[in-house]
Amino acid sequence: MHSFDPPYAHNDVKPGNVLITHRKGKAPVATLMDFGSARPARKQIRSSSEALQLQEWAAEHCSAPYRAPELWDCPSHANIDERTDIWSLGCTLYAIMFHVSPFEYALGESEESMQLAIANGQLEWPAGPKPPYPDELRQFVIWMLQPQPVMRPHIGDVTLHVDKLIAKYLS
């Protein structure tokens, strides 16, 4: 694994930017593509004009159903970091599981409804008598979709958790 200083954020992690390669007899490999929106992940916002600039940039470069709450409504005093991509990763995992992003249900009403659902972390899980995935996977998605960025895990924590899930379910 590479470490970059400063760290970069992809800023548009979504299923359409993940290429899955299947090789006979080997585990599938996921490759993140389209780095057109990538930039240094850490940004200090110190004014309402800087917050508005970031929101406008995000509206142009980040897909709405996968955009982190702090990129929708950035406070005028905030430290933005690579955990914006953790939010998008959680949305992407949900979309891979259920074939729709976790907040698209609210898009049918309006973009403002989706923004409100994202800001409040109001996930809607598909109804059904028996969930198709283990509860640990659902909790993993919830962990990545914490509306408050400081409550979201860092990528190292996500990687460790994935390793534990793989060991538990593939052993």
Image (cartoon, grey):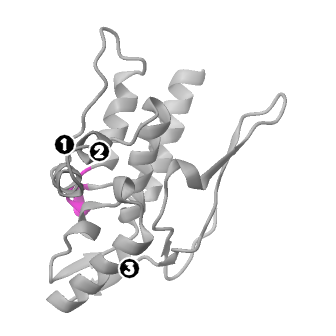
Q: Residue at x 15, y 83 (%)?
A: 76
Judge left or right: residue 38 versus residue 144: right
Q: Which residue is mark 3?
A: 42
The vertical placement of 38 against 118, above or below, is: below
- Asked if the magenta segment contains residue 31, the reply would be no
Front: mark 3 or 2 = 2
Q: Residue at x 15, y 87 (%)?
A: 48
What is the CA distance from the residue labelled 1 to the residue labelled 2? 8 Å
**Residue closest to the far front:** 109
Residue 75 visible? yes
Mark 2 is surrounded, within 10 Å at the Cα level, by few (under 14), some (14 to 19) or many (20 or more) other residues, namely: many
User: Decide: marks 1, 2 in contact (CB < 8 A)?
Assistant: yes
Quarter of the image where the N terminus is located: bottom right
Q: Which circle's residue, 3 or 2, is located before the other in the chain?
A: 3
Q: Residue at x 42, y 21 (%)?
A: 133
- The disc at residue 122 is 1
* Amino acid on which the number 1 mark rests in the picture: Gln
Judge left or right: residue 150 versus residue 75: right
- The disc at residue 103 is 2
Residue 24, image x, y percentages: 84, 30
Mark 1 is surrounded, within 10 Å at the Cα level, by few (under 14), some (14 to 19) or many (20 or more) other residues, namely: some
User: Decide: marks 1, 3 in contact (CB < 8 A)?
Assistant: no
Q: Residue at x 24, y 39 (%)?
A: 123
The vertical placement of 69 against 75, above or below, is: above
Judge left or right: residue 91 versus residue 160: left
Viewer-proximal residue among 126 and 154: 126
* Amino acid on which the number 2 mark rests in the picture: Phe
The part of the image, by quadrant, that contains residue 130 is top left
* Amino acid on which the number 3 mark rests in the picture: Arg
The part of the image, by quadrant, that contains residue 112 is bottom left
